[in-house]
């Protein structure tokens, strides 16, 4: 039971459907990562791979992008 409560409490939304502070942080971080990604002069393949990392790994993908992408 505690595991179920922990997993459901990690949502980016409050009980009334509005975004929590973590949801807002995620949206801002993901938008910043996507704008940074689009401004890069990389090949389409590399942009798609980084875009998939950002999309499929919500907080971690954006952080990994900013730490390891080798941006200019």
Image (spheres, rainbow, N blue to C red):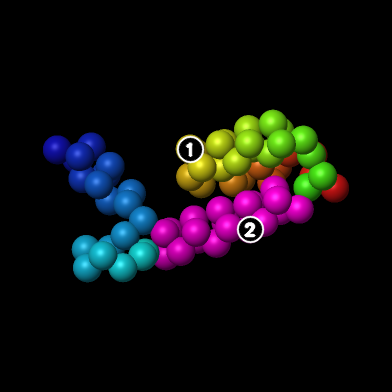
From the viewer's perspective, is residue 70 above or below residue 28? above
Most common SS among magenta residues: helix
Q: Mark 1 points at which residue?
A: 56
Give the percent coordinates (x, y) of residue 69: 73, 38
The boundaries of the magenta stretch are: 21-39
Give the percent coordinates (x, y) of residue 42: 79, 39
Q: Give whichever of 50, 16 is nearer the camera.
A: 50
Does the magenta-highlighted stretch encompass residue 9?
Answer: no
Q: Is residue 61 visible?
A: no
Q: How crowded is mark 1: few (under 14 residues within 10 Å), some or many (20 or more)?
A: few
From the viewer's perspective, is residue 57 above or below residue 23? above
Does the residue at mark 2 contact the one at mark 1 (Cβ under 8 Å)? no
Q: Can residue 49 be seen in this view?
A: yes
Give the percent coordinates (x, y) of residue 38: 70, 51
Q: Residues within 10 Å of mark 2 (few under 14, many from 20)?
A: few
Q: Distance between the residues labelled 2 and 1?
A: 16 Å
> Which residue is located at x 78 percent, y 47 percent?
40
Q: What element carries label 2?
A: helix
> In terms of sequence position, does the residue under pointer 2 or pointer 1 come before the other?
2
- For this orientation, the residue located farthest to the left is 1
Q: Would residue 58 be found to the left or right of residue 33 on screen?
A: left
Q: Would residue 28 be found to the left or right of residue 17 on screen?
A: right
From the viewer's perspective, is residue 15 above or below residue 66? below
Q: Name the residue under label 2.
A: 32
> Which residue is located at x 55 percent, y 62 percent?
28
Q: What element carries label 1?
A: helix
Q: Looking at the rendering, which quadrant does residue 54 occupy?
A: top right
């Amino acid at each position: 039971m505690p595991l179920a409560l922990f997993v459901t409490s990690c949502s980016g939304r409050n009980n009334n459907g509005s975004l929590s502070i973590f949801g807002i942080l995620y949206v801002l971080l993901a938008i910043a990562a996507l704008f940074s990604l689009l401004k890069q002069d990389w090949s389409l393949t590399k942009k798609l791979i980084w875009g998939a990392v950002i999309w499929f790994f919500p907080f971690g993908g954006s952080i990994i992008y900013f730490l390891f992408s080798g941006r200019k």
